[in-house]
Amino acid sequence: MAHDEPRATGPTKLVIRNIALVLSGALERPILDADTIVAVNGKITGVGRARDLDTEGATTIVDANGTTVAPGLIDSHVHPVAGDWTPRQNQIGWIDSFLHGGVTTMISAGEVHMPGRPRDVVGLKAMAIFAQRAFWTLRPGGVKVHAGAPVIECEMVEDDFREMAAAGVKLLGEVGLGGVKDGPTARKMVGWARKYGIQSTIHTGGPSIPGSGLIDKDVVLEADTDVVGHINGGHTALPDDQIRCICEGCKRGLELVHNGNERAALFTLRTARDMDELGRIILGTDAPAGSGVQPLGILRMVSMLSSLGDIPAEIAFCFATGNTARMRALDCGLIEVGRAADFVLMDKAQHSAGKNLLDSVRLGDLPGVGMTIIDGIVRTQRSRNTPPATKVPEIVAVR
Ligand SMILES: [Zn+2]
């Protein structure tokens, strides 16, 4: 289990060459005309043709060997607890397993599975600050886990949000998983959170496990969180007419999760496409959960939405990269100069009926992951979890 992330000990320069296809993560231009990417000290400094870029003095050279490079995938909805252990299904190494599924960044929707989770205000604030610190200090496998997402309770006052923000808390856990389940209280507290720069999300749909509750369209629209968390249910979805009301009644992020209702996810996707608002679609797993831990969950969502939702694969990848990065103001998720050098290198799986990576995803197959890179450092080579990629990249030189 990779608990100690590799760290650069000096200046680094990464050159990835011989790339067949670069997926940008940006909906407006999902495919770039490029065969080479250069990154210095963990940030992208060049994307284009090898002859036009400064590739001298590389500390690491990766031969992509004709594979596809995409931004590292972002899971917009996870429930971490402590390091790389989850008590929900009593597994260790789950974050490292997601890295093998191409996920390089995760966003906590609340550390709700913490055994003995405190629900008093002092306790929940302390836990949020602890989780933010702990996950920023320890990155399992190098994965960036944005955690410290408190679940709001009715006794909270504005000063609690100011205090948490000053201590580094940037996220709220799913509204509705705590005592606040009514629209007016949720709206007031979400407003306080926003005032102090804390992003918010909400549990949409029926209860996920015994003890959680129903959040319907009226509460979702009144709460006005930045992200409509699992609009396709977690797992129980709202009726289609309520999902349509939410899509049309706000401009917030529409999050589709693996551990939700797949039919409702496709309904949301079609609704957003009809509205010409695919930029609002972001993806999560909602793992760990009652339905388990899915290292390939984000890839499975990309493939499911592309194949059954009739969406070009290069667009579906944007839902798990650039859309999320923009909505959540992350420095990764897009292949452009200045962004974090977080990448996943993929090819079509061996024996896929698709003629190339994009075609295979469009046919519903999963890609084979050949390498992951975070902050310009190679973290994994051939994935232990995906079907084997037809072609795999290799490290040809390290200095
Ligand atoms: Zn939920």
Image (cartoon, rainbow, N blue to C red):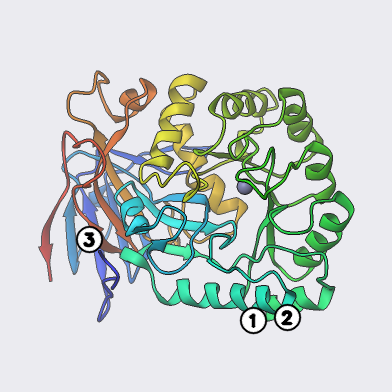
Q: Horizontally, is 369 left or right of 129 in the view?
A: left
Residue 342 appears in the rendering: no
Q: Are marks 1 and 2 in contact (CB under 8 Å)?
A: yes
Q: Earlier in the sequence, mark 3 or mark 2?
A: 3
Q: Say whether marks 3 and 1 touch (CB < 8 Å).
A: no
Position of residue 265 measured from the top left corner of the image (x, y, whole percent): 58, 30
Report the residue at 44% width, 60% height from top.
87
Residue 185 relative to residue 113: left or right:
right
The earlier-in-sequence mark between 3 and 1 is 3
The outermost residue toward the right is: 184
Q: Is residue 384 left or right of residue 117?
A: left
Question: Alpha carbon of mark 3 to alpha carbon of mark 1: how far?
Answer: 41 Å
Q: Which residue is mark 1?
A: 167
Q: What's the CA distance linking mark 3 and mark 2?
A: 46 Å
State whether residue 234 is above or below residue 379: above
Say which residue appears at 61% left-offset and 72% top-offset: 128
Q: Residue at x 66, y 33 (%)?
A: 277
Depth check: give the residue in front, 93 or 317: 93
As shown in the figure, which amino acid type bears the numbered disc 2?
Glu
Along the line of sight, the residue nearer the viewer: 279 or 267: 267
- Tell me if 72 is positioned left or right of 217 in this view: left
Q: Residue at coordinates 53% horizontally, 65% vertically from top-left?
A: 114
Name the quadrant containing residue 21. Answer: top left
Q: Position of residue 62 (x, y in %)?
A: 18, 55
Question: Could you tell me which secondary element the residue under label 1 belongs to?
Answer: loop
Q: Amino acid at mark 3?
A: Thr
The residue that label 2 is drawn on is: 163
Q: Quadrant of residue 172?
A: bottom right
Q: Which residue is mark 3?
A: 55
Q: Identity of the amino acid at label 1?
A: Ala
Give the label, 3 or 2, closer to the camera: 2
**Image vertical order of residue 214 relative to residue 354, above or below:** below
